Structure formats: C-alpha cells, structure tokens
Amino acid sequence: MKDSKGTAVSLPLRTMAISAVIVVSCALLSKFLFGFTYGILAVVIDTLLLWPAVWLIGWMAPGRSSTWVFATVIAGVFVLGQSAKISLMALPITFGDIVSGVQLIRVLHGAHLVFALAGCVVAVLLLAWALRFRKARWYALPALLAYIACLPLLAYGLASLAGPRSEGASSASVVGEHGSLTFVFADLAQGWRERWSSVDEAKIDALAAGHRGRESLGGDFRKRNVHLLLMEGLWDPLRLETYKFSRDPWDPRFRRLWEQGGRSTVLSPTFGGVTANAEFEALCGLPAYPDRVVFEDGLDNTVPCLPRMLRERGYLTVANHPYKAKFWSRDEAYPKVGFEQYNPSGAYRLDDMDGAFLNDRSMYFQTLDRLNKFDPQRPYFAYVVSLSSHFPYDRDRAKRPDLVTVSPQADLLQAYANAVAYSTAAMMDYIEAVRELDPDAIIVLFGDHAPVLGANPDPYVVSGLKGEAGAGRSGLVQMSSTPLLVIDGQKGAADMGQIPLYALPSRVLALLGPGAPKLPYAQVTGDARSRIFLGAFLARKNRGWDACTTDTPDCRKASKQLEQTKMLRKDLIQGKQQFLHAANQAWLAKPVAMQQNLPYGACKLGVQNWGPRTASSGKGFNVQPDGSNAIWLKVTEGRGTPILMIGEDEVRVTLAGNIASAGFDNPQFLTAPGEYPVKYRCEDEAGEVSVGTFVVTASP
C-alpha cells in the first residue's frame, strides 16, 4: 500500500528522519538558549518514543507538512520546553504541571499573561492543523490513541533499560541522561503505581506501636498564643556571591534577629513555587509529594495536623491569606488540617496593591487588627501567608521606589531584592507590634522556597549554586534552605539549626512545654533526616546536610526514614488511616467545620473607567497578540472571579491591582450594529451589575 507521498516502506524511514531532526534541533537549541545538555542516549530515546506517533500522523494526515508541524510542537513542548522550565525552576515538566500550570496562569497578568496564553493558543492551533486527518484513514486513529495510552509503560520500561538513576541525582540530571519524553511519561507511570499501590497495614501497625490512646493531646500546659508566618519567596540573596547589592535586601532588624537565632533554616521541598506543598509540611509534619501539589491532588482525608491538635486543646485556629480561597484548593484543604476560621481575599480591604497581590504591610496590619478583637480568654493559633514578594515581584513604584540596586545588572534579581526589602520591613513591623502587645507569644517565621530569578543569566548558575558547572550537591542544600526565625516569647530568638520543613510543627508544639499536644505520628517523623529536593535525595549527616551519592550509614538511615514517612503519608492523607486506628486515635480523623470570613465579599468589580467603548461591525478592536479583542478596565477594587458580559458574550476578567482586562474571541456583538449592554456578574453567584454600553457602528 502506498501513501500520497511515497511507499509504505519509505514512510517509516521518512518519519524517523523527521523525528530525529526535530529532536536533535530542540536539543541543540536547549543547549544554546538555556545551557541545558541532553546526552546522546537521551536524544535517541526521545526520538524512538516520538517516532511511532509521527509515523501514524504521517499516514493519516493529508501532507508531509503535518508530520513536521506535529513533531515540532511535541518536541518543542517536551524537549525545548523541558529545558526552559529546568533553567527557570530547576525542575522538569511533569504531568502534575497541568494543574500547577493552570494555577500559574491564574496569577500572571500583563505581558506575562499575554505571552503565556498566546503560547498555549499557538500550540493548540498548530496541533489542530496537523491533526486534520484524511477521512479514508480515520481507521488508524485507534492505533494512535493506543500508542499514547501505552506511552507511560513504554517510557517506564525504556528508563529502566537505560539504567538506574544515580544516587542523589536531581530530576534535571535524569532528564539529561534519559530524555524528556522518557522522564515525563515514566514519571506518570510511577505516579500511577504509587497512587494505586496498597499500604502494608502490618508495617503501619508497627509504626503505631507504643503510641496508643489519647496521649497526643498532652496534659496541662501554659497556653500561649502561637503565630506561624509564611513569607513568600523568603531566601537570603547574599548567598549569590557573584552579585553585589547597594544595601542588604533584608531589613536590618530581621538580619540581626535571624543571626541571634543562630541563622536557623528549613529545607523546603519546593523551588520557585508550589507554596501549598511548603504549607502542607509546615502544618502537618509530613513530607510533601515531590511531583504533585498535595492540597490539589492528595489530601483526601482529615489529618491531625498542627492546627487540629491545638484546636482540640481549645485554641482558635485561624488561617490568613489575602488571595482567592480556591487557589490551590485552600478552601477545601484548610478545614482538613484543622483550621476553624479562614480569612481569604474577601476578608481584606484591597487598598494597596502590588500587581495582583495585596501589599504585605496592609495585609499584616489588617490581620493584627482582627487578632486584637479575639476573645482574650481563648488562646489562638494565627497562620499568615504573605504575598508581596511573589513572582514576578511587581510593586507600586510610586509608593515603593527602588531601595536596592544590583551589579552586575540582573533585572529580576533586582526586582526581587526590592520586593523582599519592603516585605521584610513590613514583617518586622508586624512582629514588633505582636511582641509589644503579647510579649509571651511564640512567633515562627519561615520562607516557603527560594525565588525564581530568571534564566538569562540565571543568578544561581552564575553564583555556582546550580548548573553543570555549579556547586552540585552543596548548591542543592543552599537552594533548598530558607530562613527560619523562632521567637520564644521573652526568651527571644531560638536556635533551631537546619531542619527539613516537615520537622517544624513538632518543634513549634515543643515550645509550649511539657503537657503540650503532639502530632500523633511525631515518633515516626520526629528524627527528620531526609529531604527530597529537585528530585535529589538529601540526608542529614554528621557535618550537616548533603546529597546521598554513596551507600553510607547516614544515607541508609535517611532512606529508611523516608520510606516510613512516605508510607505513613499515604495512609493518613489518602488511605484508610490505619495508623490512627492502630493507635486508638481514630476520632482525630473526624472532619471539623471551618468558617470563611468574607466581610468584603468573595467577588467584586468596582469599575471607574473602561474602554474601548465603540467598534465597527465585522472588525476587531484593541486586538491582542493572541487574536482576542480586549476591553481594559480601571477599577477601584477587584476581587474574586468576575465575568464581563457584552450582549450575549461573556468572559472572565483578569485582575491586576487597579487595572483589569477581558479578552473576547470572535464576539457575536461585533456581527451587527447596535448598542449592547455591558455588565458583570460573579462566578457561581446570581445577579448582574451594569457597567455601561458598547456601541457597534456599521462598517464604512
């Protein structure tokens, strides 16, 4: 049988050549653009995995150009896109990025949002064009779908044949050795295996032995107020020794307190994002998944975390985070970890914005005002998540001009340095106010992860902390380490050393003294000696933390503990919670209610001005790079997910401080002249609010 461009024999050879050319080209571009190197074996395996799909596309599509376009899009995303993500985030693409990628787009605005959406639209359109199959050959579609379905198992097998990953090797190095497509689909297969594997109940029973009854609740103890502060992207820029700063990016009061506390640090599970995984560890005392967002994909059960254990002893447990409650599914996750109240963006006046986020100073002191109204007879646990130093480090420069300059020039690093300068100052003002009002309070501050600082150049690579010529294992420890400040009431700053973030909840409870509650599983996680970071296995050793590259007693101990905590995590957050049953503490699995405080409403759009207000029928207006027709809005206040409606067309509004936008694709109201009402409504809410009228005139 012959296809329209050659024999059935030539088609496999031609598509193999196309696959090889595209993969090799993307690998070379990865090296040139992002400094990431794919080995020869990686290129060969990626070519072999891509080839059957390209072959089937070549058989079904009407021309050779379809095979080139299809291969280019797939290799562009998985080979070139992989190196781009590694250069920026130090982590490879995984299937979990489908969730986190959507969440990332939701926090972008302006040019970042336009480029992200435009890239997605272009990729989808190109794939749609490449997949315009000939009707006579639709019968081959099941073969294509079957191959895609088998890819995870095939990739998993090829990865195994290619050899085991080196001990302590990062995920990025595995991609360079085994290939991007291999890594992504093998990772998916491994995820399936872990999710659907059963927990060994006998081993869980053994872990629970000697920890039975209600002893986790403790006895009599002095109930002091506890403040747990997560500061977005808090990391020490002075570790970037290649760069010089005109002043310390940190507020000097914070630097002094941190040094008084022995320069304590936590080893974060994430880099550059996925704050929710750092939250899970800091609240629940269990290691997060390295490739999934626990709040989004994993937290199925109610778990006896730090807030829950304090709540059981009479504490009011309150989470404060001035952002969308549904982001990272916090509205569903927070009650499962034990919070009684939650103050999302609807609990705050959005009166001082840094890009899409409420400025930290406004957030802290609105939070402080709320805390001061609590019943003084009831102790509280106040958890606060800041936002001003969130990527892309936007700032209201009219109110907050540059304080720090960086040399050599690194724009994103300078933006971060200035953001963290203002954030640490606001945070220290808040801490000083709390200490003045409540000198005995326990205050714990930590950074959730190191910040993204760009790729051209990458300050981490330039400073020798990562990359092929970087500091390797020691660099991984430095990138994972974020500041930890613990103020034990009038005793002042306490030295906590260097601990993995999931060890923090037990340390916080220990500060309350004898008789304080404990995490029911603290005996398993308490001797925290393992950390997975960027796919590498770090362990606590006599001389500090380091990656495990050889089989040593320290690494064996860390590996054993890691396997125990992984098994315990699966049982507690997704399984039957056999541990709690074996320890006679099943009552801690009972769900508890949480109240969301929304005095300002979950959704609002105060429109001050908007435009354009006219267009000609059949013609676009304010056309954006992605082809949409954009309406801009100047707003006095914007929160939640408002939806803009013009006539019968409606789209979500993108909020960015006092500026908002809405892009219409092929709007119906442009098809005929007339006056169309402009309104907005809130998602999942009844009622509409009038904004004005859009006039469509007849085309000249």
Image: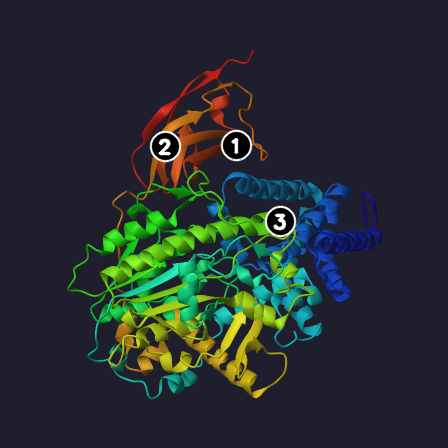
Q: Residue at x 45, y 74 (%)?
A: 499
Residue to which mark 1 is pinned? 665
Asked if 465 appears above or below 632 in the picture, the reply is below
- Sequence-wise, which precedes: disc 2 or disc 1? 1
At x 21% / y 74%, what residue is drawn?
222
Q: Mark 3 belongs to which amino acid? A: Gln
| Mark closest to the chain's N terminus, 3 or 2 | 3
Q: Residues within 10 Å of mark 1 (few under 14, many from 20)?
A: some
Q: Nearer the viewer, mark 3 or mark 1?
A: 3
Amino acid of disc 2 = Tyr
> Between tags 2 and 1, which lies in front?
2
Q: Residue furthest toward the top? A: 700
Q: CA distance from mark 3 to mark 1?
A: 39 Å
381 horizontally vs 639: left or right: left
CB atoms at circles 3 and 2 under 8 Å apart? no
In the picture, the disc for residue 489 is none
Q: Which mark is residue 409?
A: 3
Along the line of sight, which residue is nearer the eye, 480 or 171? Answer: 480
Crowding at dot 3, Cα within 10 Å, few <14 / some 14-19 / many 20+, comes out as few
- Report the side of 550 relative to 335 (left or right): right
Report which residue position mark 2 lands on: 680
- Vertical order, 499 against 240 (above or below): below
Q: Secondary structure at mark 3?
A: loop
